[in-house]
Image (cartoon, rainbow, N blue to C red):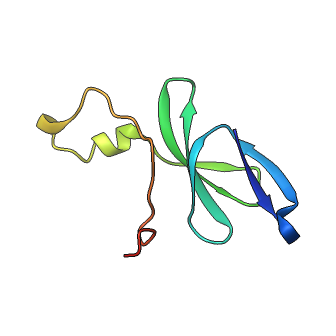
Amino acid sequence: MFWIRTGENYQTKTNQDFGQAPFWINDDTFGYVRLEGGTRWEVVFATLGQDSRETAFEPSDLEAQLPEEQRLTRLSIALVEPAGSSGE
């Protein structure tokens, strides 16, 4: 489980979801990796102040981009690094 703190002096603590490796997309939107159904990892997008979550992609979406002869038997998502976050 992870928490997002907002507001003055970051006093407001919101229980977001069970997941890992949260990252910011902009000031209001963030993403994270979560285990869906106990069997597959997916990347989820969410917006502060809203209860809805949107699955951005899951391993099968990535596997579909690989040539068939290079596809893996198992692919897990552990971390997402948004473009520009490493000083690019």
Name the residue: 41% across, 68% down.
Answer: 86
Residue 12 image offset from top left, x and y in percent:
87, 58
Residue 32: x %, y % from top left: 57, 49
Provide residue 66's location: percent of width, then percent of height: 21, 44
- If the image is split into quadrants, where does the C terminus sit? bottom left
Residue occupying the point 42% across, 72% down: 84
- The image shows residue 14, relative to residue 59, as above or below, that is below
**Residue that lies at the very extreme toward the front in this rendered image:** 9
- Farthest residue, direction bottom: 88
**Residue depicted at x 66% and y 72%:** 27
Residue 2 seen in this snapshot = yes
Depth order, front residue of 54/75: 75
Residue 68, x across and y down, in percent: 16, 37
Q: Is residue 52 above or below residue 38?
A: below
The answer to which image quadrant residue 15 occupies is top right
Horizontally, residue 30 falls left or right of residue 15, namely left
Residue 7 in sight in this render: no
**How many marks overall?**
0
Q: Residue at x 15, y 38 (%)?
A: 70
The relative height of residue 69 versus residue 29 in the rendered view (above or below) is above
Q: Nearer the viewer, residue 14 or 65?
A: 14
Quadrant location of the N terminus in the rendered image:
top right
Residue extending farthest to the left is 69
Residue 71 vertical position relative to residue 56 in the rendered view, above or below? above
Q: Is residue 16 left or right of residue 83?
A: right
Asked which quadrant contains residue 75, the reply is top left
